[in-house]
Amino acid sequence: NNNNKNNIIYYADTVVEGHSPIPNDDSSLDIEQWNARILNTTLQSLQSGQTLVIGNNNKYHLMGGIIVENLTNVTIDLAGELVFSKRIAQWPRQHDSNGRVLECLQFNRPTNVTFTSTGDNGAGAILDGNGATWWGIPFIGYIQRVENRPRLLRVMHGVNLILENWLFLNSPYWTTLFDNVNGLIIRNVGIQVKRTKRQHTHSAMDLTAFNTDGLDVSGRNVHIYDCNIWNQDDIIAVKDNSHGDGISENMVFERINGSGLGLTIGSIGGASSRVRNITFRDSYIQDSVKGIYLKFRHSGNASIKDVLFENIILDRPQQYAIWTGPAQQADTINPCHANPCSLCWPYLPGAVCEGEAQGSYRNLTFRDITILDPQGGGGVFMGSKENPMENVLLDGVRILSCDDKNNNIPYTNYSQTFPLLLPVSDRVEDSGYVILFQIVLLVIIATILSLLGYGYWILRRKGKQRACLVLFGTSTLFTTMVVVRLVYVTSMLSSTRNDYSVCEGITGGIAMGDTYPVPACFDDQTTTTSGELSCQVISSNNIWMNSILSAILILLFCSMIPILVFLLDGKRPQLQLYTTIPTTSENDDDDDDEIGLASPISSSSENESNE
């Protein structure tokens, strides 16, 4: 039942059990399930030399759980859109006790397969994961599902693959995973994951789209280039080859424009995992949380070696420009759980972050890295005392600030930086969840204020003056503690923003060329003195301003208590002073004259200033 001419098969013309795919209709679960079943059946039936054309500039809504085995010598031409279902309750799951959801699309053991697009819909092929539904209410959605969410595309044990001209939108979980591949080319691919319409930042609200990695790969002989990625986790991540021989090697990533948690190797931690001969070069990373990120989780004799980062611009990294050490992650609903480095480090007392003793770093080179206006410092080099990093070279790693920024930015606006992505105003469909979260937060704050104010008023009416003082004092103490903590964090960040926060556990570390500043644990062999740099001291006005605004909001929070009391009581709240008034009266019938009774001293006009 296919229009089969020159080995071209059109998904729109396919009939399975009397059903044809229905475009542009998400009105029922039945349509989504049949569209998915027809696509799964059609993909699985492809023969060597055939091309499947999907879309023809149409949009198909479908259920996930599509699994295709052993395709050989075929082309998949996505010429429209595949939009995956929002119906989480009906999503296919594995038949085990964990109830793990299936991926949106999964290809096992494909050989000589090309994923491409010849569509003319303006953005090429689009795979839309409807991630907002899976992310749910910010923070709460993660507690509900943690990492039980589907990847948009997973390819396992593939050989000689090409992915090009596809745009991935709002993946519920990792956008792609190419697992244990041998021979992979990815080019002209866009990945876009956003919760808000902000162009140049990853706000706390955006980052609640946890674990939305961009391109994750393991295996060997990988070349990824000319890609645009804006997501809320690792931009690109080289993974340990846990489903193969444990080795990921011979990979080149170049001309990547991205923003997320950085160009990443890790987290690595499998038993005897090896990552080697990896190159990142000629890339521009804008407003990323971290810029370059190498990380070990709790590992068993794993290693990362022979790595080159070259000719990379890190524009305004929001946290650390370069992080080499333990993985800063939680992987539980407790965000401060150290695995092995806590996300709360260094901001909360007691947060743990230590170099991973079972992970070995060897032969790392950072060459011609330009860091513009870093918001959290040059970075972290954290090896372990038991197993220090060896042979780490910084050659021309420069931290610049606002004065030199405009001379080093290669792009002027978002659309120019990320031409493969949609405008930020498009496809941000989760505003309802964000607004709901903001409403809930405001209700919680209003409830706390109301309870504090009402409690204060009740205690005053009952004459519990000491309790009033305790309540008011506790609120003031809480405010003071938060303000002190903000000042501490601010001073810590502002004092290290033009330097490296941690440098330890390294042997054979060398800084050369015009590297500036030189981390403390590196041998300084640079040729440029500090006086030759035009901008060395990085302004901390932005951090101070945020801290001051936060402190003002907290002070206003506590100042609302007496205001609420005034509204409830109908008059200006006062604290009455009490004292013990002795008396010589022997009349026991009058309780007010009993010796030792605490009686109020009224606030007269002459002592009103004392009040």
Image (cartoon, rainbow, N blue to C red):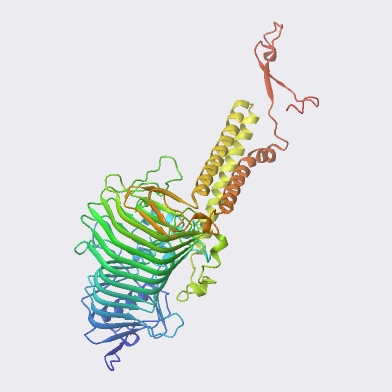
Residue drawn where x is 56% and y is 47% of the image: 445
Q: Is residue 168 above or below residue 114?
A: above
Residue 55 occupies quadrant: bottom left
| Extreme-right residue of the structure | 606
User: How many labels, in total?
Assistant: 0
Q: Is residue 498 left or right of residue 307?
A: right
Name the quadrant of the N terminus.
Answer: bottom left
Residue 488, position as x, y percentages in the image:
52, 42
| Extreme-left residue of the structure | 245
Q: Is residue 384 left or right of residue 292?
A: left
Residue 601, position as x, y percentages in the image:
73, 21
Residue 324, position as x, y percentages in the image:
36, 54
Name the quadrant of the C terminus.
Answer: top right
Q: Is residue 566 above or below residue 222?
A: above
Residue drawn where x is 64% and y is 42% of the image: 560
The one of 245 and 207 positioned closer to us in this rendering: 245
Q: Is residue 364 visible?
A: yes
Q: Is residue 102 visible?
A: no
The one of 266 and 14 positioned closer to us in this rendering: 266
Residue 268, position as x, y percentages in the image:
28, 57
